[in-house]
C-alpha cells in the first residue's frame, strides 16, 4: 500500500460528517485519572477534531501526532497553543507504525487512522504500557472495506489497464479486523473493553459527492501513485466516478452514503 499524500482542504470538505464518529467515541470514554490529563491523538490530521478534546478536558495537555507535513502545518496554524481552560494543544510528526508513548498518558485516542497502519494490533501492548492505571485507549476506524466505495476502486485498479500502476497501492481487505478480534486482543491485554459498530447514513450534496468524499481519504493512495501523470490520474478518476454514480444514485434530497465504523474504548485496569 502506497503511503498517501494528504490534502487538508479536500479532507475538511466533509468535516462535519467525519467529526461525528469522534464525538460518539468520546461520549463513551470515562473520566480520566490525571489532573490535568495528558492526551495523545494518533493520526490527528488537520487538528480539527484534536481541538475537540480540549472542550471535553479543558485542562488537558494534548499532543496530536501525524506523518503528513501538510496536515501538521494546517493543525499548527489553526489549533496549536494554550487552550481556554488552561491546558495546551500541540502537534508533532510521528509515524504510527513505530510510535511509542513518551512518558505516561491518561488517554491515547485515534480517529480514523489505524486502518492505514499495518499490524496495528501488535502496537496495542506498547501503547497500553504508556497509559496510567485507569487510563483509556480509544479509537474508531472505517469498517466498510467491502462496500462499493472501496470494492469498485480495487476492482478497477486490478484491471489490465491499471494493475501495473495501482494493483498494490490501495488498502487491503484485512486493513481493519472484525470487532471480536479487537475485543479479544484488548481484553487479553488486561483492559475492560467496549467494542461496537455503527452505520451512518450520510446525506451528501453536490455533484459526484461520493467521489468528492473519497478523494479526501480512501482514494489518496491512487491519486498519489498517479500524481506524475495527470492525464492518467484524471482518466482513472473519471472511470471510478462513473462506477460510483451507478452504485450511489442521487435523490432529490442528496446522495446517501452508508458508512459503517468500528469503535473501541479500552480502560486499563487499576492494579
Image: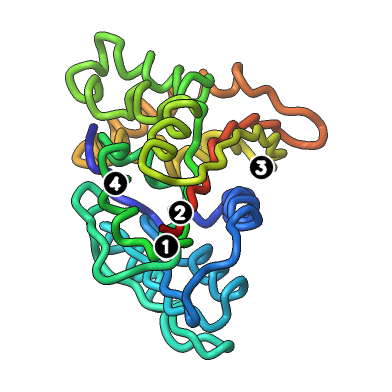
Separation of residues labelled 2 and 4 (CA atoms):
13 Å
Residue at the disc numbered 1: 133
Give the residue at the far right of this rendering. 252
* Number of numbered discs overlaid on the protein picture: 4
Q: CA distance from mark 2 to mark 3?
A: 47 Å
Residue 206, disc: 3
* Label 4 Cα neighbours within 10 Å, binned few <14 / some 14-19 / many ≥20: some
Q: Secondary structure at mark 3?
A: loop
Disc 2 versus disc 4: nearer the observer: 2
| Label 1–label 2 contact, CB within 8 A | yes
- Sequence-earlier tag: 1 or 2: 1
Give the labeled residue for mark 4: 125
Label 4: which secondary element: helix
Q: Is residue 52 above or below residue 26?
A: below
**Viewer-closest of 12 and 18:** 18
Marks 1/2: CA–CA distance? 6 Å
Q: Give the distance between the C-alpha atoms of the residues marked 3 and 4, in whole angstroms.
A: 43 Å
The residue carrying mark 2 is 269
Amino acid at each position: 500500500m502506497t503511503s498517501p499524500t494528504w490534502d487538508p482542504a479536500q479532507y475538511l470538505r466533509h468535516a462535519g460528517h467525519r467529526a461525528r464518529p469522534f464525538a460518539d467515541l468520546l461520549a463513551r470514554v470515562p473520566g480520566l485519572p490525571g489532573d490535568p490529563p495528558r492526551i495523545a491523538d494518533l493520526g490527528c490530521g488537520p487538528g480539527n477534531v484534536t481541538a475537540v478534546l480540549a472542550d471535553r478536558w479543558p485542562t488537558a495537555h494534548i499532543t496530536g501526532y501525524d506523518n503528513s507535513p501538510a496536515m501538521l502545518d494546517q493543525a499548527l496554524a489553526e489549533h496549536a497553543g494554550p487552550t481556554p481552560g488552561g491546558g495546551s494543544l500541540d502537534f508533532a510528526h510521528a509515524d504510527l507504525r513505530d510510535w511509542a508513548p513518551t512518558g505516561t498518558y491518561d488517554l491515547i485516542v485515534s480517529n480514523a487512522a489505524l486502518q492505514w497502519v499495518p499490524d496495528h494490533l501488535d502496537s496495542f501492548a506498547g501503547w497500553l504500557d504508556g497509559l496510567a492505571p485507569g487510563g483509556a485507549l480509544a479509537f474508531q476506524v472505517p469498517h466498510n472495506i467491502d462496500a462499493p466505495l472501496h470494492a469498485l476502486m480495487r476492482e478497477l485498479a486490478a484491471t489490465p489497464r491499471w494493475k501495473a500502476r495501482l494493483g498494490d497501492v490501495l488498502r487491503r481487505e484485512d486493513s481493519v479486523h472484525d470487532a471480536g478480534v479487537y475485543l479479544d486482543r484488548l481484553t487479553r491485554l488486561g483492559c475492560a473493553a467496549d467494542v461496537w459498530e455503527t452505520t451512518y447514513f450520510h446525506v451528501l450534496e453536490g455533484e459526484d459527492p461520493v467521489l468528492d468524499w473519497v478523494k479526501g481519504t480512501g482514494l489518496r493512495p491512487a491519486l498519489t501513485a498517479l500524481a506524475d501523470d495527470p492525464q492518467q490520474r484524471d482518466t482513472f478518476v473519471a472511470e471510478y466516478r462513473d462506477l460510483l454514480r451507478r452504485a450511489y444514485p442521487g435523490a432529490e434530497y442528496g446522495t446517501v452514503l452508508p458508512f459503517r465504523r468500528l469503535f473501541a474504548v479500552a480502560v486499563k485496569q487499576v492494579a
